Amino acid sequence: MTSHPKVLMVDGVADRVRELKTAGQRVAHCHGCFDLMHPGHIRHFEAAKRLADVLVVTVSPDRYVDKGPNRPVFNETLRAESIASLECVDFVAINQWPTAVETIKAIRPDYFVKGQEFAGEQDVTGKLQQEIAAVKEIGGEMRYTDDIVFSSTRVINEHFDVLPEDLRDFLSAFKSAGYADAVWESLEAIKELRILVIGDAIIDDYHYCMPMNKSPKANVITSQYLREEAGIGGALCIGNHLSSFCDNVTLLSCFGSRDDYLDYTRANLSGGVELVPVVRDGAFTTQKRRYIDNTFRQKVFEIHFFDDTPVDGNVEDEFCQFLTDRLSGFDLVIVGDFGHGVMTKRIIDTLCDSDTFLSMTVQTNSANFGFNYVTKYPRADYVAIDEREVRLAMHDRFAPVTDLIGNLSERLKTKRFAVTLGRKGSMIRERGRLIQVPIVTRSVVDTVGAGDAFLALSAPLAKLDAPPEVMLFLGNIAGAMAANIVGNNEKIAEAEFKKFLSVLLK
């Protein structure tokens, strides 16, 4: 909320612009984040005002700012008021949408004005192209100012404490070592890989409620149901994340005949994923229903609908027949083993007996605690699990994790062994070397699926023998983005990933 007379709602600005245009005045419109406002922005606004009689500026709302971790530095109200204080600016509004498209259509400016750095640029998110199309639709003109250019992001990254000190130090060394180019080359290279994802299908179900009070007749806390949402998890979300970056992804998983969720899965999988479902008679498709306190966004209760006994011989036959027939046609296999009965010894042996590059996550959770360790696999080319799973597999709570990784790597004959360390980032052991990379953001909404996203990005890079620093860095970005999504409601989009990456590398 603001009392500044120049700051209006978008509809209010649109009404004023209609009146002014009827009176014969021409209107220029600038749009952006403008966090942090600097001399380049001011000169951009002054140049835009020289094109027209009236200058309108709209700012991106906080919830849609995609400038990387801990942004925006200044909230939408402060940004709007700062711009409104400039003499050359006539009206300011806080946008309500992810792009300026709807705002352009509402305001209908004569000129939509961007800085010279945007001229001819293909925005990786596609937002700029959508805005240009909207300007053409309303009969307006695109104009580009030609003046001094600053990067707010670079200024903030270098001179403000928006990035943690360890990340700033890492990024400085990372760029000095020439890895910035390797990052983009690696992302292009993984597009061509033929990838098989195999493992447990999981439906992540969130029911939001409002705890009210204890029942007077029983020791039960009564809660009011508010809403629910769901997403595809387990091996399904690994395949979905991969589809944003790789053109050839096949997903082999098991679904129950009682509640198969096949139509739901197909509707939520990216169109680029080939789904190969194997149906298990009489079983549920694994569904994990979490009840969430809506006020504090904390889990208060969880129910699993599943049969976690090992799949029967018929299901094993279908899995093994698929692997026998098609495994040689893949460059890389990614196993998502959540310990819910799919990855039996026979299926594991079939995978491990092949020459195809084998990567995996083998997760410990409340349903398989003590019974699902990575040591059930006789070999792996790449493993990505968390520190707790390393300690459980090695039955050691206190030894340095670096020692445990070394012992476990040798036992599995693993070339690269990555461990996610929560707020400490991630670590990899590669050919006897240990490398650690810090987290890229401290912002967390829900950690469910963060490790799967880390694996989805790092496994193809392991196959291509990318520098371990690049593997962990890109894996950490994927994990950070997933940790800011409730469950697995959305896949990590390539365009948003690249935007996040480019911001960090400025």
Image (tube, helix red, strand yellow):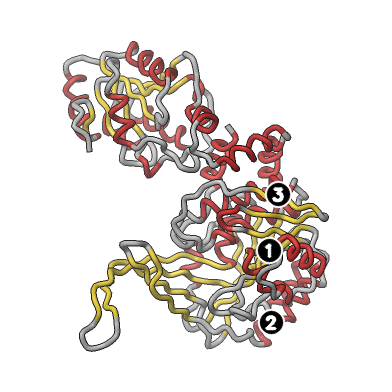
Badge 2 amino acid: Glu
Is 245 situated above or below 102? below
Badge 1 amino acid: Ile
Q: Quadrant of the N terminus?
A: top left
Labelled pair 1, 3 in contact (Cβ < 8 Å)? no
Residue in the image at 33% along x and 31% along y: 79
The secondary structure type at the circle numbered 2 is helix
The secondary structure type at the circle numbered 3 is helix
Nearest the eye: 279 or 404: 404
Labelled pair 3, 2 in contact (Cβ < 8 Å)? no
User: Marks 3/2: CA distance?
Assistant: 30 Å
Is 185 situated above or below 429? above
Nearest the eye: 399 or 164: 399
Is 343 situated above or below 158? below
Which of the marked residues, 3 or 2, is nearer the chain's N terminus?
A: 3
On the image, numbered disc 2 is attached to which residue? Answer: 316
User: Marks 1/3: CA distance?
Assistant: 16 Å
Q: Position of residue 436 (x, y in %)?
A: 68, 50
Q: Where is residue 71 in the image (x, y as percent from the top left)?
A: 44, 39
Left or right? Give the position of 325 relative to 487.
Answer: right
The secondary structure type at the circle numbered 1 is strand
Q: Residue 277 carries which label?
A: none
Badge 3 amino acid: Glu
User: Marks 2/1: CA distance?
Assistant: 18 Å
Q: Is residue 252 visible?
A: no
Q: For the residue carrying disc 2, how many other residues have a C-alpha within 10 Å: few (<14), some (14-19), or many (20+)?
A: some
Labelled pair 2, 1 in contact (Cβ < 8 Å)? no
Q: Can residue 184 be seen in this view?
A: yes
Q: Which mark is residue 334?
A: 1
On the image, numbered disc 3 is attached to which residue? Answer: 192
Of circles 2 and 1, the one toward us is 1
Left or right? Give the position of 230 relative to 430.
Answer: left
